[in-house]
Image (cartoon, rainbow, N blue to C red):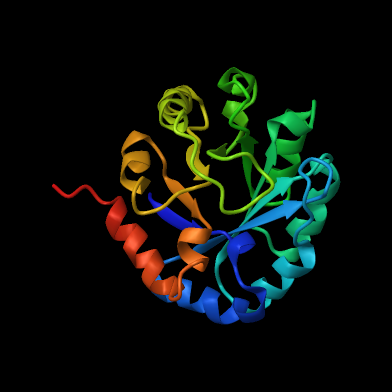
Amino acid sequence: MFQIAPSLLAADFWSLSTDMLSAVEGGADLFHVDVMDGHFVPNLSMGAMVVKAIKKKLNVTLDVHLMVTDPDANIDDFADAGADWISFHIEATPHAHRVCHKIRQRGCKAGIAINPGTSLSTLEGIIGDVDFVLLMSVNPGFGGQSFIDTTYQRIELLAEMCHSATSRPFIEVDGGIGTENIRELRKRGMQVAVAGSSVFGKPDPGAAVRQLIQASKDPS
């Protein structure tokens, strides 16, 4: 499995439907939805109403990333709206196991997100209970940031952890991904690439998705 997940945080909301359809034509079959509460991260962003509106019109997987201080309180709203995947931050709750099981009980894939400055060792007690790990390659809360190079080493360590886990979670990477680094990230273990500015920051989102897919492939 290898997928490109265009991030709606980078989209032009005036032309959201047109740009999403373009991305789908380019090969995107899921979209990343960043949810910010103004507390866990400084900014505010979209809520469950956006997910519900998209789900009514597009048959795509919606990957909801909760950057909030109380993820448990948000799960039902987004599951009801049509989220397919829901991830939350290990830093945001002392009850990660309970949150994971609640997400799964609602029929969604459960993911755990981890910030660049947080040790991967914090995942050891929960990694067997998740479907995926969202590795942040920028600090959460703002789009358009530069990729943090230490992510290359972190993804290799995370891949070893995932391979040993009972649930064999897949790895999603979020932040600063473009044609210049996507192949190396895929080679080291990334299976889902969250791409914001490198898709919706381009004149033709569909062409941008195709370029990312092509750039991710081993030339040999």
Q: Quadrant of residue 46?
A: bottom right
Residue at the extreme left: 220
Describe residue 98's horizontal placement relative to residue 137 as left or right.
right
* Whether residue 121 is situated above or below residue 82 in the rendered picture: above
Is residue 190 in view from this perspective?
Answer: yes
- Most foreground residue, 37 or 198: 198
Q: Give above or below for 39 relative to 208.
A: above
36 to the left or right of 31: right
The residue positioned 56% from the left and 47% from the top of the image is: 145
Across and down, in percent, residue 102 comes to 76, 41
Residue 111 location, quadrant: top right
| Residue 216 place in picture, x, y as percent | 31, 51
Q: Kindly tell me whether residue 29 is visible in this rendering.
A: no
The residue closer to the viewer here, 89 or 205, is 205
Q: How many marks?
A: 0
**11 sits left or right of 50 in the view:** left
* Residue visible at 72% across and 75% down in the picture: 53
Side of 151 relative to 11 (left or right):
left
Residue 139 pos. (x, y %): 62, 39
Looking at the picture, tell me which residue is in the foreground, 76 or 156. Answer: 156
Where is residue 162 drawn, in percent x and y? Answer: 47, 28
Q: Is residue 116 above or below residue 213?
A: above
